[in-house]
Amino acid sequence: MKPSTVQIKKMPSRFKHQVPKYKVTRSAACINCGTCAKSCPYGVHERQEGHNKMSAPIDYKCIGFECQNNDFYCVKKCPRGALSISLNPMYETLGDYRWTADMITGTWIMAETGYPPQRKDLEYNTGNSGGGFDKLRFKFPKGHPKIDKFEISTEIPLNKRNDGRANIIISTPVYGGGMSFGSVSLSTMVSKAHNAAIWNTFTCTGEGGYPELLQPYNDHVITQVATGLFGVREETIQRVKIVEFKYAQGAKPGLGGHLLGEKNTESVARMREAVKGTSLFSPFPFHSVYSIEDHKKHIDWIKQMNPDALVSVKVSTPNDVDMVAVGSYYAGAHIIHIDGGYGGTGAAPDIAKKNIAMPIEYAITKVHNFLKDEGARDAMTLIASGGIRTAHDLAKAICLGADGAVIGTAEMVSLECVRCGNCESGRGCARGIASTDSELADLFNEEWATQRLTNMYHAWNVQLVEILQKFGMRSVRELVGRTDLLEHIDYSK
Amino acid sequence: MPKKYHIHSKVMPLNLDYVYKFRIERGENCINCGRCTKVCIYEAHKRGKGDPRKMADPNTVVCRNCFRCIQECPRGALEKSLDKDFLNIGGSYWKSDMFITLWKQAEDGKVPVTGAGYRGPFTGPGFDSMWTDMSEIVRPTRDGIHGREYISTSVELGRKLNHLTFDECGKLLSKIHDTVDIQIPIIFDLPADNLSPNVKTGLIRAAAELNTFIVLSIEDITADIKKYIKNIIPLISPEEIDKHEGLIKSARIVAFEYKEEMSNAFPALKDKIKKISNALTIIRIPAKKSVEAIVSRLAHNGAEIIHVVADYRGMEINGSANENSRLGKDIIRAIHLKLVEEKIRDEVTIIFSGGIAMAEHVPKAMICGADLTAIDLPLLIALGVRLYEEPEKIIVFPDGLEKVTVRTIMQRMVNLMGAWHSQLLEVMGAMGIREARRLRGETGRAIFFEEIDNETFGKIFKKRETTNI
């Protein structure tokens, strides 16, 4: 599948207004002459039919200070000097150190248009966390790129063991993270799967069963076997191409999963074969795995049940993550999926998110090098997740040693998540993304969501191809482990 | 299995104004259509009580920042910003968000849980430059969150023997010292001196309810609170021992402020106490530049418990704020390592206080080498106290606090400690550590920023140029 064949379609926000970066103020000096409404091509100013007075400026449409070089700049055009532009205090309430307001806005634009933002006033590639990816920069060579964009491949193989099992190739080195039915709404889940099919990549069921509506996308679904074994059945294992063991998740390493009773609605309970309204724990760890040998037993069990499937092992990032990765190689896994401490979508204790296990940037480096030293790197696919927010993070993760990445939050943000963090409370997500509440889950339809995800994946692919082109590479596979193409702003070369 | 230690949390709202993060304002172009009341699932928007044709002012205290009212108002008439009070409170160490989360934990006693991953800086100074480790496949407690009943958070205070000695017949010659056990590695430190009586009583009763200790100046131990003496550590001056003999007799632990002559005179001081009762002694020592040398001298001279007190931001006390001041993490590590090198670490108990602001600071201080911690400000923040760091430390008590019942005050502190205790269990569970006392000095089960960064990025990107983190 060629990324250039993916259908991009403009898919605007489902809300009337977006979150404004700027504030346009009209003072009392305004004489309602309408000059601004005539000149602004973005529609910030308008006078409704039959009204004498100008309407209040529509802040979010304003492109900000960079407009001052334009002939139509309203502040200059106004004959009475009644207009001014400033940063909107509202913008400060959006985002955080890791996902800045600019990054969220940038992702929204990608999901709407399918391309990276054209605006120059948004720093959407890096966050403000002051470490990790946010301190790494690409060292692009000077001169004009010589390779045509259409010659550049973003495909990666997921089975590198040469063991006779399916040779699965995904068209873009990203797939969707596990979010269970129960933690997200059905339309979120189905649109993630639909998008995975469009992009010839994967999405993951998470631990919470395999809703029937996902069946049309079986070839693009990874089903998860986690410690609670919720919704794991022989036929779900047999219908997929990849089965994932979830040992731990980066946001709450060592703590297991926990679906609060309020989210365990009737349909969720049926899927999980549990009692409605009870809190469902997926305990840490697997009580049947005490060693790599036990781990191998599990993998053999899956391989026996589905002779063609690949096995992925998802672990978090403790100090010995490198050893666990090598252990997984010896146990027969195809994919080692490491989930860093700073990511995650679902509810987790704040103390765990911040403090337990290491950020993904370090873990990728450690695992890649250790697998290489053990001579196992070429037989394993290394997938990173937990803090991959942008296409630049993705490319940096690959430079550090990953083959590809899994994303979760970026998908949620494409569906207009504002990262308010209240996924767990009461009726759940106020924006209907991570909610099974009958009213809230109806806030958007599958078609809208699928196109938003497809657009965002497209924008990332465009950016990734640009990066590869600048480096003069024909395939994303050439980028793996190329730390020499990165610099860290705290270290000298 | 012994009876499980349990902290009885109970929802306990406090009807005083406190800090909130978001302010929503309704502009004049609002047409009172009521769309906002329909979209807000937190009920921030309601129609006016007096005149239902008009919208009431938004109740922004309940706002959870979902942006729905902002985005769906047909006129774009709603504006949101970070509340000014929120921005001003605290400072570089006591972050605005901490006040809200401490307040909330005091209200419900629950572990703070949110979705959508971590939001803060990659790393930071002091305790923010370390992560606790966990183990994926091989670890001592294999029970995850269902194994909590097997995790003990109790710690022992007092002097311990390095080894036992026996005579030829195998009879034990060593005299085992007395120790005191508490069930959480947290005691309450000397409270601020301008507390209203209900707050003071609430603090003492909370310490008693949790079966831990509160350090109180001897003058504050009035007749009506003497019944809580088993949970009070009187702070006395050595000259006044005789005067307070009665009190010392019933106390389990007493504390002294460190004075220079104490290093040598300590054994005599301890003996004097032991003649009166079995009470253990704490020496309270400010965390100055050479604190580890003094701690070591005291330990060699028989000190039982040493309480190292950093400033309210967990920094070394130097008289002047200069950049070389060490932070809690480094002060504790220096003390711990010095005592380990001198092979005396196990004999003495180290308490650390100053800048213990969040639950995570307790296990982190212990991993760095403290046996337990002491706290003060979080207990007051639980009651709505505001702290400002700039231009100088100011503590502001909320109006009406003096009228709040002792029961409410006590329960809120118990709730806060309940939430911290549960968070300690989360961290210990993930680390696979069953005994809080085994956390002490377990730096092998932690990941330090400097080390991991050098080990990975240092190797790739060579020499580090700045330490700007």
Image (spheres, coloured by chain):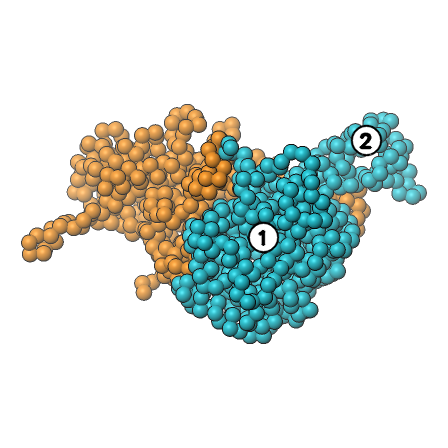
Chain colours: A cyan, B orange
Q: Amino acid at mark 2?
A: Asn
Q: CA distance from mark 1 to mark 2?
A: 40 Å
Residue at left 45%, top 39%?
Answer: B459
Q: Which mark is residue A70?
A: 2
Q: Please indicate, yes or no, whether residue B119 appears anywhere in the rendered image.
A: no
Position of B250 compared to B87: left or right? left
From the top left corner, tell me how far across and down residue B315 is, in percent. Answer: 41, 33
Q: Mark 1–mark 2 contact, CB under 8 Å?
A: no
Residue carrying label 1: A405
From the top left corner, tell me how far across and down residue A380 is, in percent. Answer: 51, 57
Which chain is indicated by disc 1? A
Taking depth in this image into account, of A411 and A163 the one nearest to the observer is: A163
Residue at left 18%, top 37%?
Answer: B267
Q: Please indicate, yes or no, whether residue A66 appears anywhere in the rendered image.
A: yes
**Are callouts 1 and 2 both on one chain?**
yes
The image quadrant of residue A297 is bottom left
The image quadrant of residue B17 is top right
